[in-house]
Amino acid sequence: MEYLFTIWVLVTLNFFLPRAMPGDPFLYLSADEGQEVARFSEEQRQYYLEYYGLDRPVAGQYLSYLADLLRGDLGYSLYYNEPVSAIILRRLPWTTFLVMAAVLLSTVSGTILGSLSAWYREKLLDKLLFFHLILLSEVPAFLLGLVLLFTFAAGLGLFPLSGAITHFASYSSWWEKLLDILHHAFLPVMALTIARLGGMYLLSRNSMTTVLEKDYLRTAWAKGLPQKRIIFRHALRNALLPIVTRVFLSLGSLVGGAILVENVFAYPGLGHLMREAVMVHDYPLVQGIFLVVTICVLLANFLADLVYRKLDPRIGDYSGIRGG
Amino acid sequence: MTAEQYLLEIKNLSITYHAVHPPVKAVDGVSLQLRKGESLGIIGESGCGKSTLALGIMGLLKQVGVEGEIIYRGQNLVGLPEKRLRNYRWKDMAMVFQNSLEVLNPVLSIGEQIGEPLRAHYNLSPLEIDQKVVKLLEMAGLEPEWRHCYPHQLSGGMRQRVLLAMALSCDPELLIVDEPTTSLDPASKNEVLQLLQKLQKKSGFAMILISHDLGAVKKLTSRVMTLYCGRVVELGITSEVLKNPLHCYTRGLLNSSPNFFRYKDLWGIGGEPPPGGSIEGCAFYPRCCQGEESCRQARPPLRYVALERMVACHKGGIETFLRAEGIRKKYILKEREIEAVKGVSLEIKSGEVVALVGESGSGKSTLAHILAGVLPADAGQVFFKNKKVEGRWATKMVGGMQIIFQDPFSATSHRLKVLEVVREPLDIIKWGKRDEREEEAMKALQKVQLPVSPEFLNRYCYALSGGQRQRLAIARALVTKPKLLIADEVTSMLDPSTQANLLRELKALQNRHGFAMLYITHDLHLARKIADKVYVMYRGEIVETGVSFEIFENPEHVYTKRLLREAFRDLV
Ligand SMILES: Nc1ncnc2c1ncn2[C@@H]1O[C@H](COP(=O)(O)OP(=O)(O)O)[C@@H](O)[C@H]1O
Ligand code: SF4
Ligand SMILES: [Mg+2]
C-alpha cells in the first residue's frame, strides 16, 4: 500500500518536474547539427504540439499520461523518433548489469574485509585496512572512474575507452562475447565498487564488532561449537542485518553514481541516455527514465523488506505467542 | 586427599581485566575444590567477581590476565588453546548464563540453539537431535513446540528454562549457574529453583551456584563461599554459614537479605567495595566494624577457624566482645532471698544486635548491671574482649563498654547541665584536654540529633523532655566511642512514635559505627525489628536463644511461645 502511494507521488512529480524546466524541445528537435534554425514551419509545430497533446490543458495531459502509463506506454521520444519504452528497455540491462555487479562485489568484499577487521580488531591488519579504505571511501565514483580511465584505458591501454561491447564484432562463441562485455564493463564496475567499498567495509566492521561482543556469542563459544559455525551461523548472520538494509537503501545513490560513471566511460546505459535526453530537452524520455529508475529503486526497497523479514525473526512478529 | 578425587580444583586463581584503566583484578587468589556431584554456592554483592570467576573457569574471558590453575579432572585448563578447551566445553562443563535478552541468539530458533552442541559434540542425525531437544525442553518444563520459536517470543522465566535445557544438552559433569533467579518474579523464581534441585538430583552433576539470593543458595548448595572484591572471605557448610556467619561481610550480606528477615528492617553494609586489586591489606577494612589499623597492613589469609569453616580475617572473623558464664545473683531482702539471675551465660559479638527479652522482673536489668561491671555477681565470670571484667574498667575507657540505664538520670545528674552530662564520662577517665572533651561531647550530641546551641548546652537536665533526656543518655554513652552498648529498656518510657524514631536512630548509629548492642526490652515488636540474635529470659534463666528469625518464626520454649502470642495477639 505504502509502495503504491509512493509510486503515485513519484509518477506525479515526474509529470510536473520536466514541465517546469526551461527550454523548448522544438528548438532541438528542429535543429540540424550545430545550427539552430527552425526546420518546422509554424503549422508543423502546431501539428506536433497537437499530436503530443502539449497544447491541451495540464489536467488533461496529466490524465492521459496516467492512462498511458497503465498501458506501459511511456510516450514517444521526439529526438530518437522511437517509443520511449523501447529505448529504455534497450539501455536498462546495461545499467542493471553495472549496478548489480558493483553491489555484489562491493558488498561481498566489504563484508569480508570488515569482518576480518573486526575479528583482528586493533591488530595490524585491522589498522591497515581501516586506514586505506577510509581514504578510498572519500573519493567520489566519477573521479575514480576518470582516474581508472586515464591510467588503465588511455595510459596502459588495457581496457577499451568507451562502450559496452565492441561494435561490428563477430564472435565465434557466446563466451567470447561475454568476455568482451566483461572487458568493457570492468573499469566502470571497478569505479563503482571501489567507491562503495569503504562504506560497506566500515559498516560491516562496526556491525561485526558489535556482534562479536554480544552475550550470545559468548554463549556460542561456551557451547564448544566449531569456530566456523560461530563465525558464520552466529556472528555473520546477525552482522548481516544492518548490511542488508544498507545495501538496498543505498541502491538509489548507487544509481546516481552509475549515471556519472556511465558518462565517464560512455557506457550505453540509462545514465548515458539520461544525459543525452536532458541535453535535448526530450521530456518523454527524461520522464520515462526517471520513472523506471525510481520504480526499480522502490522495488529494491520492497525486496529489502522481504529479505529482512526472513533474516530477522523479530521484525513484524505480532503473533502474540509471547508470555506464558 | 589426592587431586584426582576432585572434579574441579582451582588453585590461587587471579583474573585481571586489562582492557580498562586502571586494570581491575576481579578475581584475586581464589582457591576452591569441588567433588563429583557436590554443589557449591558463591555469594557476594554484585561486582565482587562472581561472574568473572564463572566465565574464567569456562575460559571465556578475552583480554584478561589469568594466573593460577584451574584443574579439571587432573588437567590444568589455564593456557590451554581454544581447540583443546572446546572439548571440555558443554560436554564436561556447561553454564547457565546470567539471564538477559541477548544471552540467546536472536535470529536462531530455540530448538537450533539447544540442539547445536549435540551436533558439535556427538555424531547424531538431525532427527535424533530433534528428539533430544524435545526431551530436554520437556525436562525443563516447556512444551516441545517452543523449539520453533525465537528468543524474543519467550518470557524471562521461560528463557531461564531454555538456558537450563541448553546447558544440560550434553549431560555435563559440572554445571555453573550464574544468578538463575535475578530478574524473575517470585513465582517463576521458585519454579526455577525447584527445577534445578530436581535436575541435580536426577542427573547428579556438580554445581556451582552463583547468586546473591541467599534463599536459593540455602536451598541448593551444601557448601558456600563468600566472595568480596574477588577474594574468598569465608567458606563453610551452607547451613552453618547462614546461621552463624563468622566474617563480618557474610553477616552484612545476611543482614541485607530479605529472605531471612521477614520482619527485621534491612540494613545494608555501609560503604562501597573498593575496585578489585587496589587494596593491600584486608579489602573489607574500610567497611569493617571491628577493623583496626593493623588490618590495613597485610592481607588476611584464608584460615580454618572451626571444623569445615575458613575465614579470611586477622581477628579470626567476628570477634566475641562479651562473654558471660554462669552468672548468678541473689538479692537478700529482710524476709526472703530473691534469686534474680540463675546461672546465665551469653555471648555478644562485634557489630551484633542482641536482644534480651523477657517480662519485667525476669532479671534482665540485674544481668545488665553485672555485665557492665556495675554490680558484682555472686558467681560466674564476664569477659570483655577476652579480659575478665572486675570492677568498672571496661566502662571507663574509650572503645569499651557503655550502659544506658532504664532510668537514665539519678538525682545528682538532674542538677547538671547538658554539656556537663555528656562530657562527664570523658572527664572521669581524664581523656584529652577540656576543649577536646567538649568537642567530642558536641559531636555525640549531633549524632543523636540534639541541638548544640549554647542555650541548649547550658540547660539543666530537669528541663528536658523525656525523649530529649533519653537521647542525651545515648549521647553520653556514645561519647567514649564504645564497642559495646548495653541499652536497658531505653525506649520504654516514651510514646510509640518517639520510641520508633529513637530506635531507628539507634540502629542507624549502630549500623554506621558498627558497635555491638545488647538491647534489653520486654517489647517483642521492637526486638523483632532490630535484633540479630535473641535471648529469652524467664525467672532469672535463659530459656531460649538463637538467631532472631528462627526464634520469631518457630519458638520452641513454651514461655517464648506465650510471649509471642501475647505480644502479637492484636496483630493476628
Ligand atoms: N569486561 C569487563 N571489563 C572490565 N571490567 C570488568 C568486566 N567485567 C566485569 N568487570 C569488573 O570486574 C568486577 C567483577 O565483575 P563481575 O564478575 O561481573 O561481578 P558479579 O558477577 O559478582 O556481579 C567488577 O568490578 C566489574 O566492574
Ligand atoms: S577485622 Fe580486620 S581483617 Fe578482619 S575483616 Fe575486619 S578489617 Fe578485615
Ligand atoms: Mg554477575
Image (cartoon, coloured by chain):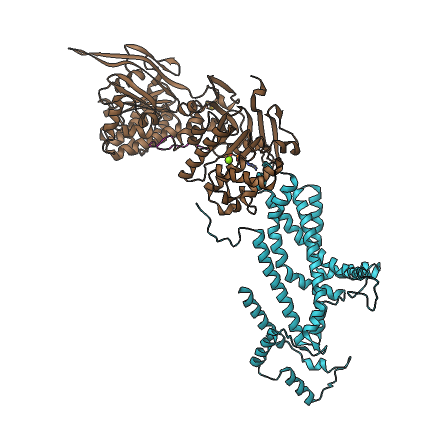
Chain colours: A cyan, B brown
Name the residue: 74% across, 67% down. A263
**Residue at horizontal 28%, vertical 18%?**
B543
Most common SS among magenta residues: loop
Horizontal side, residue B82 vs residue B241: left or right: right
**A175 and A114: which one is in front?**
A175
Residue A251 among those drawn in magenta: no
Residue B138 drawn at (x, y percent):
48, 39
Q: Position of residue A290 (x, y in %)?
A: 64, 70
Q: Nearer the viewer, residue B368 or B186?
A: B186
Where in the figure is residue B497, as x and y percent of width and height?
Answer: 26, 35
Q: Is B443 left, or right, of A214 in this rendering?
A: left
Out of B375 and B35, give the one closest to the viewer. B35
* Residue B541 picture quarter: top left
> Residue B508 occupies which quadrant of the picture?
top left
Q: Which residues are magenta?
A: B260-271
Is residue A234 in view from this perspective?
A: yes
